[in-house]
Amino acid sequence: MGEIKSQYKAIVCIAGNHDYGLDPFYSDIFKEHYQRQKNQAYLEAVIDSLTDEQIRTFGAGILSNCSHYLYNSGTEVEGIRFYGSPQTINLLMAFRAGNSKDANEDYWKHIPEDTDVLLTHMPPLGVLDLVCF
């Protein structure tokens, strides 16, 4: 993206289920920061206590060529409102939301109604998603 950034007014990004390096639960960079504790339960508690803003800031630092990295968040570019989420229902992948309909609906209920462009890593439930609850 660094080579094309100057060609565009904005680059809006989200992560996906293979972007383990951006998900604090899997990221070696993040884990090394807390490795001093040598306690998996502590690490999981720290990760569970992270706010969406902390996770977004972590990812934005890695994807510095994006002008807007969205993690369950939104931005506005030239009057167009974007909202993005990398959440997936696959428990074996990055950015897992859970494997139940309720776990996933919790993420989607926070999307502002005035959103113009929705960026997700998964299609709408029941529309070509190949996952059924």
Image (cartoon, helix red, strand yellow):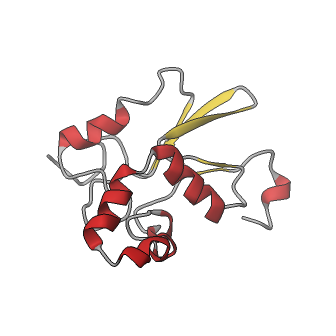
The reply, left or right, for residue 15 in relation to residue 89 is right
Q: Quadrant of residue 23?
A: bottom left
- Residue 54 position, x and y percent, is 52, 50
Question: How many discs mark residues in the rendered view?
Answer: 0
Q: Quadrant of residue 24?
A: bottom left
Q: Is residue 28 above or below residue 57?
A: below
Q: Which residue is at the far top?
A: 114
| Image point (80%, 50%), residue name | 8
The N terminus, quarter of image:
bottom right
Please name whichever residue, 50 or 79, is drawn nearer the observer in this view of the structure.
50
Q: Which residue is at the far front?
A: 37
| Image point (33%, 53%), residue name | 48
Q: Is residue 2 above or below residue 101?
A: below
The reply, left or right, for residue 45 in relation to residue 55 is left
| Image point (47%, 67%), residue name | 19
Please name whichever residue, 48 or 35, is drawn nearer the observer in this view of the structure.
35
- Residue 108 position, x and y percent, is 36, 35
The reply, left or right, for residue 63 in relation to residue 96 is right
- Residue 39 position, x and y percent, is 29, 74
Q: Which residue is at the far right?
A: 6
